[in-house]
């Protein structure tokens, strides 16, 4: 990374715990805080609409599930751009970074615009896929018509944030998120409840708050990108200058990652369809649980993003042993953090979930959902961060095959049969959602330790690859 960077790339082979802690402080904490604020924005809508009753909470929750499907479609391009940009940042290649950024904007933008068109033009149709509850659909339709306009903004903001993360400028997205969250809260307060002479709009008011805050967030990010004097500057000419050789290289990595995210989103959509056909209390409980699950993701997602940047930087710079070392430490620390957060949430169950205006049955559901998630969440986190590190190291296929095959062959069929065929009680249905995680954990952990996923795309990384692989083979023989 050189002297101009913040100093994660070093010559020594292993990453010390002190260095790992520094990476957490410099990269992971700001990213986690930004993720937390993004989750808080969703929570603000859900909590503030709680005064309108469980049906309103369920309506916002169903809309959030559609937003999650969008996230799955564009996150593949975000992940791929992080893969390329972090390695190019380690190799000090601004031209490569700009090309990766431009392709991500074009590809992900297509999905964002397509989702906007569908949700704005036919909200009833897409909501009908997720739930058969007429009351929920009626409340959710005006929300979707407004929030749909924000989808392209979310996509472009995510790509810009990926560029900033890969160059270790993590404080800027955090500040932008704080400003947009405060604005979202203020608009929600005025329009949901009809304060200061404004009309009382309920669910639609929450949607307006989300849209306006999204506009402000992307505007601030673009303004910073235009004014930044960082050594890696955005160049529209370089970003959108189509180089077919680079497009082929990008596509070879992006295709499995994008397929991973889209198929994962489809699998989650099927699971959400099952949940959308449960009782009103179960749907409301699921909406509240998803918000709290988002808080957990904020922390482990921040660590995963930071670790992938650190791994990509080291691999791109040719320090392959250090890239492997970062990945090992992250796979150990991240599940422990997840377990701790879920445990604290369990202990604070009543005051936390009481904010959502849930009834007694829904509150009971959330309690036992957390107990189930306490174990599976930690395992899931480990699998997630391993896949992120694989991608940062240049391997985009193994994690994809494991995640999608586990989801489609185990979790989705089991959940569907339990909920739609056998009509089991809600908590029994929910327990099948994470059935694939243990299998993935058992297979992916040895693969992580062997380091075969390190496949550099930069000159310095490729130059160090043969020596690294030879050293890993010798270590394997010694272990025997």
Image (spheres, rainbow, N blue to C red):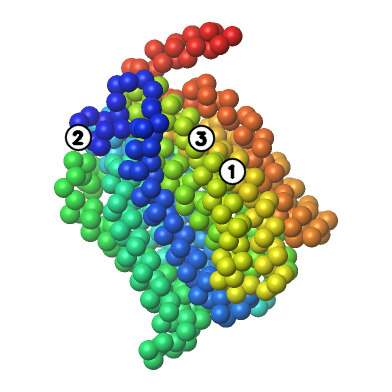
Q: Earlier in the sequence, mark 2 or mark 1?
A: 2
Between the C-alphas of marks 3 and 2, the distance is 28 Å
Q: Position of residue 61 (x, y in %)?
A: 58, 66
Q: Mark 1 highlights which residue?
A: 378
Left or right: 327 as drawn, with respect to 129: left
Left or right: 247 as drawn, with respect to 135: left
Q: Residue at x 65, y 65 (%)?
A: 285
153 relative to 357, above or below: above
Q: Position of residue 221 (x, y in %)?
A: 28, 57
Label 3's element? helix
Left or right: 102 as drawn, with respect to 305: left
Q: Which mark identifies residue 140?
A: none
Q: Residue furthest front?
A: 347
Q: Position of residue 361 (x, y in %)?
A: 72, 70
Q: Mark 2 highlights which residue?
A: 4
Between the C-alphas of marks 2 and 1, the distance is 36 Å
Q: Residues within 10 Å of mark 1 (few under 14, many from 20)?
A: many
Q: Position of residue 372 (x, y in %)?
A: 68, 51
56 relative to 442, above or below: below
Q: Nearer the viewer, mark 3 or mark 2?
A: 3
Q: Earlier in the sequence, mark 3 or mark 2?
A: 2
Q: Quadrant of the C terminus?
A: top right
Q: Nearer the viewer, mark 2 or mark 1?
A: 1
Q: Mark 3 highlights which residue?
A: 331
């Amino acid at each position: 990374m050189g002297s101009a960077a913040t100093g994660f790339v070093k010559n020594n082979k292993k990453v010390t715990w002190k260095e790992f802690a520094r990476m957490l402080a410099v990269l992971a904490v700001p990213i986690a805080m930004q993720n937390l604020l993004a989750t808080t924005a969703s929570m603000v809508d859900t909590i503030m609409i709680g005064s309108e009753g469980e049906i309103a909470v369920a309506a916002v929750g169903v809309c959030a599930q559609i937003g999650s499907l969008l996230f799955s479609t564009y996150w593949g391009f975000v992940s791929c751009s992080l893969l390329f940009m972090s390695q190019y940042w380690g190799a000090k290649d601004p031209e490569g970074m700009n090309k990766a950024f431009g392709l991500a904007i074009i590809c992900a933008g297509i999905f964002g615009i397509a989702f906007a068109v569908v949700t704005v033009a036919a909200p009833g149709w897409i909501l009908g896929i997720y739930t058969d509850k007429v009351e929920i659909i009626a409340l959710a339709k005006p929300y979707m018509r407004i929030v749909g306009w924000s989808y392209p903004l979310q996509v472009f903001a995510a790509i810009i944030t990926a560029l900033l993360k890969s160059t270790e400028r993590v404080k800027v997205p955090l500040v932008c998120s704080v400003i947009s969250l405060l604005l979202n809260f203020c608009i929600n307060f005025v329009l949901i409840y009809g304060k200061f002479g404004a009309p009382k709009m309920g669910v639609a008011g929450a949607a307006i708050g989300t849209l306006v805050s999204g506009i402000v967030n992307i505007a601030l990010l673009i303004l910073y990108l235009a004014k930044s004097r960082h050594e890696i500057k955005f160049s529209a000419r370089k970003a959108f200058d189509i180089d077919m050789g680079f497009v082929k290289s990008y596509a070879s990595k992006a295709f499995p990652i994008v397929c991973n995210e889209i198929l994962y989103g489809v699998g989650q959509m099927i699971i959400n369809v099952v949940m959308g056909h449960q009782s009103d209390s179960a749907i409301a409980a699921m909406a509240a649980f998803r918000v709290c699950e988002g808080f957990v993701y904020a922390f482990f997602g921040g660590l995963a993003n930071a670790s992938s940047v650190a791994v990509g930087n080291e691999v791109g710079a040719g320090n392959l042993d250090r890239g492997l070392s970062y990945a090992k430490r992250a796979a150990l620390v991240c599940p422990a953090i997840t377990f701790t957060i879920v445990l604290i949430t369990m202990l604070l169950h009543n005051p936390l979930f009481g904010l959502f205006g849930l009834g007694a049955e829904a509150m009971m559901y959330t309690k036992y959902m957390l107990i189930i998630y306490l174990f599976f969440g930690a395992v899931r986190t480990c699998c997630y961060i391993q896949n992120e590190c694989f991608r940062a190291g240049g391997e985009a296929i193994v994690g994809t095959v494991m995640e999608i095959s586990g989801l489609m062959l185990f979790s989705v069929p089991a959940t569907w049969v339990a909920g739609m065929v056998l009509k089991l009680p809600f908590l029994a249905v929910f327990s099948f959602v994470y059935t694939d995680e243990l299998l993935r954990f058992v297979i992916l952990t040895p693969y992580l330790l062997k380091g075969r996923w390190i496949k550099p795309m930069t000159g310095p990384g490729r130059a160090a690859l043969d020596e690294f692989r030879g050293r890993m083979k010798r270590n394997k023989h010694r272990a025997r």
